[in-house]
Image (cartoon, rainbow, N blue to C red):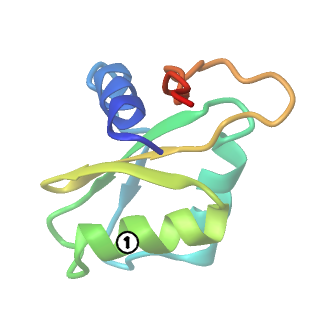
């Protein structure tokens, strides 16, 4: 993912509310599964890490991304954003990554 694409996703995520919360029991298999299922309806998901969770939000974001085959867009404070494009019908079209070809 390029910095331009990441910036675009960050701008889209700024208006999102967290749809999941990681609490004191940290990252459970059930929570990971629920986040994975949420990618069936949403390509961009924001997750909040509650104050009573002792784990680092960066580590939690990386673990969730690995387990759900998604990408971490950003981690700000106790919130993180994940992106996973729909394989069949992507709703979010990322800015083009191709640069002008100079031969």
**Numbered marks: total:** 1
Q: Check the picture and name the quadrant holding the C terminus.
A: top right
Q: Which residue lies most toward the right here?
A: 88
Vertical order, 11 against 51 (above or below) = above
18 vs 85, left or right, is left
Q: Residue at x 81, y 36 (%)?
A: 87
88 vs 90, left or right, is right
Q: Residue at x 37, y 72 (%)?
A: 60
Vertical order, 85 against 70 (above or below) = above
73 vs 48, left or right, is right
SS state under label 1: helix
Vertical order, 48 against 66 (above or below) = above
86 vs 63, left or right, is right
Q: Residue at x 22, y 76 (%)?
A: 56
**In x, y percent, where is residue 7?**
30, 30
**In x, y percent, where is residue 76?**
17, 50
> Viewer-proximal residue, 91 or 15?
91
**In x, y percent, where is residue 11?**
29, 22
Q: Residue at x 65, y 61 (%)?
A: 69
> Viewer-proximal residue, 58 or 101?
101
> Viewer-proximal residue, 34 or 13?
13
| Residue tagged 1 | 60
């Amino acid at each position: 993912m390029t910095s331009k694409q990441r910036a675009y996703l960050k701008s889209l995520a700024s208006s999102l509310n967290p749809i999941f919360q990681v609490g004191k029991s940290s990252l459970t298999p059930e929570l990971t599964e629920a986040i994975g299922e949420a990618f069936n309806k949403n390509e961009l998901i924001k997750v909040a890490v509650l104050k009573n969770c002792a784990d680092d939000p960066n580590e939690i974001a990386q673990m969730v991304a690995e387990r759900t085959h998604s990408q971490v867009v950003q981690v700000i404070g106790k919130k993180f954003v994940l992106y996973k494009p729909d394989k069949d019908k992507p709703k979010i079209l990322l800015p083009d990554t191709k640069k002008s070809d100079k031969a």
